[in-house]
Image (cartoon, rainbow, N blue to C red):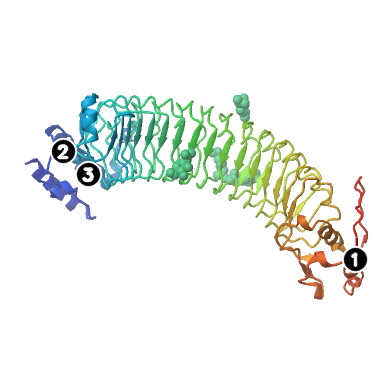
Amino acid sequence: MVILFFIITASFLVSVQTKELVLPRMLINTEECTLNPCEVLKLMSQYFLIVHAASRPQQEKPDQEKAAPFVVEMSFEKRLRQAERRLQAVEQPVWKLREGVKAEWNHCTEGMCRCIPDTKSFICWNAHLKSIPSTQIIPMDIVNIDISGNQLETLHKDTFRGLTHLHELDLSNNKINFLPFDLLEDLDSLVQLRLQSNELDELHPQIFFKLRNLNLLDISKNSLVLLPNVIFHNNPKLTVINLSDNKLEELDIGFFREQTELEELDLSRNEIQRLKVDCFKNLLKLKILDLSKNQISNISDNTFMDLVNLEILKLHNNKIVNISNYLFANQTQLVFLDLTMNKISRIESHAFTSLTNVQELLLGQNSLSSIPVGLFLKLEKLKRLMLFSNNLATLDSNSFIGLKNLKHLLLNNNILKNFAIDVFRPLQKLEKLRIDSNKLQSLPTGCLEHLPKLVAVKLEKNPWHCDCRALYLARWLRASPHKLWDGQAVCRGPGDLGGVDVGLLRYDDLCEGQWASMLSLSPRLPFYHGEFVWRNYNV
Ligand SMILES: *[C@@H]1O[C@H](CO)[C@@H](O)[C@H](O)[C@H]1NC(C)=O
Ligand SMILES: *[C@@H]1O[C@H](CO)[C@@H](O)[C@H](O)[C@H]1NC(C)=O
Ligand SMILES: *[C@@H]1O[C@H](CO)[C@@H](O)[C@H](O)[C@H]1NC(C)=O
Ligand SMILES: *[C@@H]1O[C@H](CO)[C@@H](O)[C@H](O)[C@H]1NC(C)=O
């Protein structure tokens, strides 16, 4: 009878909506129906709601409905799909939950999967399960359940009923698209919950409400678009949350309000455009924040204000344009900052002043055309600075002041034409320098001297002009052949010197040859006003 009613309702729904709808499988295959009357009643009222919503004009929705908590605007199709999934969950078999005694553990090991009484674990990894094995005995003092890597689409709400000792639950790598809101209700002891690599596109606001001891939650690689802003409000012990690789567009204000113990938050590979003010409020213990591969263009000044213990911040592959003086003002513990692949064209000159512990600063693949005076002044611990693939045309004497411990400086793929003779002087620990793929025709005489740790310089793919101005480069190459990193520095010209390795040319070739006369040479000899002493190269 009931089933018949469903079929009638469902076909009515199909006729109401012209779009094609998929009927729940159970409506067609009725032989194995296990619905209890209560569940049927709930589902019926659900269907009535849907029908009611569908027959009501869209714009008529009362305002208070929007304001009500947890009410998310839902299309007719979405509601129907939700009800279908609920039906499917109700239909799922439940394994046999038994008292946690030795005999039951012995029965547990007789099942199709690995059951380990010593560690109170049940492991059914990669077993092609389409549903929970209904004959399996699960003792209720079980500590660890791993049913990852199967074909599960959903679970019955009673699957984990009464498992108050469960510490770890791994449901990853299945096809789960729906979790009943009370599925995890008894798991008071749960510490780790893995749901990554499933097909979840929504979660009930209260799904995690009873998990007061939850420490690690991985929901990466699902299809979540929107998370209710209360979803983590009862999980004060979370230290790791992974939401990477979903379709999240924004995070609401106060989203992580209760996560005062959070240390690691992965929000990479989503579609976040805007970070609401205060969305990271209270995360005083956060150490690692990954926001890479989103669409973030504009971050307001106090977004990271509470993240006073942040050590790693990944913001690469976004659309950030400006970095203000205040954005990183409280990040004194930051060690690693990745801003690669944004659209940064403007950095205010005190933007990095607080980053006194930063060791790696990645600014490659942006649109910087100059380095503001004193930008790196306080970065005494910086070891690696990436500035490749920007629009830098020149560098002046104080561009790198403060970088006492810098080891690697990457300036390749810019449009550098020249730079101040002493630009690298502050870099007493510099080991590797890339200035290849620029527009350099010559190097300022003496610019690579007094760098006691220098071991490798990459110079190729510059239009080196082999007249007397190339003398310094030619002599440096001969004196330090072992410091040339990879490809040769090759003359672009003039005339038949084009294609010649700069390091092979001597004074006569560069300054007295047939091309030298075409140039006004001033000055011909190395010239430097400071304490710089010209080395005696063998010409
Ligand atoms: C989050 O999940 C993604 C994909 O599953 C993984 O690559 C990444 O390492 C995880 N992040 C953290 C912080 O565990
Ligand atoms: C950036 O965000 C701030 C604060 O949310 C806003 O006032 C400003 O207009 C935004 N700027 C752009 C270019 O979107
Ligand atoms: C970046 O800064 C410039 C100059 O202050 C401003 O005009 C522009 O709107 C800013 N862009 C964003 C996205 O904040
Ligand atoms: C963080 O920065 C704000 C101003 O940007 C300041 O008022 C606050 O005291 C700082 N907090 C800490 C813990 O340093």
Q: Position of residue 40 (x, y in %)?
A: 14, 36
Q: How many marks?
A: 3
* Left or right position of 242 against 346: left
Could you tell me the amino acid type at mark 1?
Tyr
Asked whether the beta carbons under mark 3 and mark 1 sit within 8 Å of each other, the answer is: no
Residue beneath label 3, please?
84
Q: Position of residue 441 (x, y in %)?
A: 79, 63
* Left or right position of 358 against 132: right
Give residue 427's quadrant in the image: top right
Residue beneath label 1, please?
507
- In this view, the mark in front (3 or 1): 1
Q: Is residue 428 above or below residue 310?
A: below
Q: Is mark 3 within 8 Å of ligand 1?
A: no
How dense is the environment of label 1, judged by Cα within 10 Å: few (below 14), some, or many (20 and up)?
some
- In terms of secondary structure, where does tag 2 sit? helix
Q: Position of residue 58 (x, y in %)?
A: 28, 45
Q: CA distance from mark 3 to mark 1?
A: 84 Å
Could you tell me the amino acid type at mark 3?
Glu
How dense is the environment of label 2, judged by Cα within 10 Å: few (below 14), some, or many (20 and up)?
some
* Left or right position of 106 against 510: left
> Which disc is residue 44 wearing?
2
Residue 313 shows in the view: yes
Residue at the location (84% across, 67% down)? 505
Q: Nearer the viewer, residue 253 or 448?
A: 448
Residue at the location (24% across, 25% down)? 102
Give residue 187's quadrant in the image: top left
Residue at the location (9% across, 40% down)? 2
Which one is earlier in the sequence, the residue at label 3 or at label 1?
3
Q: Nearer the viewer, residue 92 or 27?
A: 92
- In this view, the mark in front (1 or 2): 1
- In terms of secondary structure, where does tag 1 sit? helix
